[in-house]
Image (cartoon, helix red, strand yellow):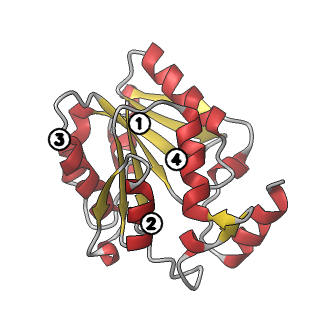
Amino acid sequence: MDLVILAAGEGKRFGGDKLLADIKGIKLYQYMEKIYNQAYDFDNKIIVSKDGEILEYYKGRGFTSIYNDKPELGKSRSIKLAVEELKKIENSGSALFGVCDQPLLRSDTISKIIDEFQKSNKTISSVRCGNRLGNPCIFSNKYFDELLRLGEDEGGKKLIKAHICEVLFVDIENEDELMDIDTKDAYNYVLKKIH
């Protein structure tokens, strides 16, 4: 299982680079790296970002760091850059795609989605709380070419809807785990929740 972390959002609604926001004395992008690394021993790890500081940090922790020079093109740009890198890896069977602004996501949840996916005969997996889908998601390599054909601001949900019979939904109880820090209000909410 490979790991892709998407960290190239422009942070317009947040009013600045949210990935540099402080979470328990460290920056959000550092906090997220610990969550992913505690969850699973990934074969290959990729980070896609527009920020040199983030790319250098992750490179020092064994990630392949990919610079997104056009983040304004939306999340599909980062997905495509990551998939192009995955296709260079000889034995890349499937990849977990996560984001870098979801600090209430638990390592146990990541471990659970990987474990249940590997035990199943499905080729896509998504975390779900009630009717709400969220990150992370897993795609087997049979979908890599389809991910490369995503439109400008489309994401993995397009493939999930198109291949619903192939999707393993992993249900979680706490919807907070799916929360992205897109606004200052969301950030303040997260700070109250993290002990």
Q: Residue at x 21, y 45 (%)?
A: 146
Rate crowding at label 3 as few (under 14), some (14 to 19) or many (20 or more) other CA atoms within 10 Å.
some
Upstream in sequence: badge 3 or badge 2: 2
Which amino acid type corresponds to the residue marked 3 in the rendered image? Lys
Residue receiving disc 1: 138
| Quadrant of the image occupied by residue 145 | top left
- Decide: marks 1, 4 in contact (CB < 8 A)? no
| Label 2: element kind | helix
Q: Looking at the picture, does residue 34 appear above or below residue 154?
A: above
Alpha carbons under labels 2 and 1: distance apart: 23 Å
The total number of labels drawn is 4
Residue receiving disc 2: 54
Alpha carbons under labels 1 and 4: distance apart: 9 Å
Q: Residue at x 64, y 47 (%)?
A: 105
Q: Nearer the viewer, mark 2 or mark 1?
A: 2
Residue receiving disc 3: 87
Residue receiving disc 4: 135
Rate crowding at label 1 as few (under 14), some (14 to 19) or many (20 or more) other CA atoms within 10 Å.
many
Residue 141 in the image, given as x and y percentages of width and height: 24, 33
| Label 4: element kind | strand
| Label 1: element kind | strand
Q: Quadrant of the N terminus?
A: top left
Q: Nearer the viewer, mark 2 or mark 4?
A: 2
Upstream in sequence: badge 2 or badge 4: 2
Alpha carbons under labels 1 and 3: distance apart: 15 Å
| Label 3: element kind | loop
Residue 84 in the image, given as x and y percentages of width and height: 18, 50
Q: Residue at x 63, y 38 (%)?
A: 107
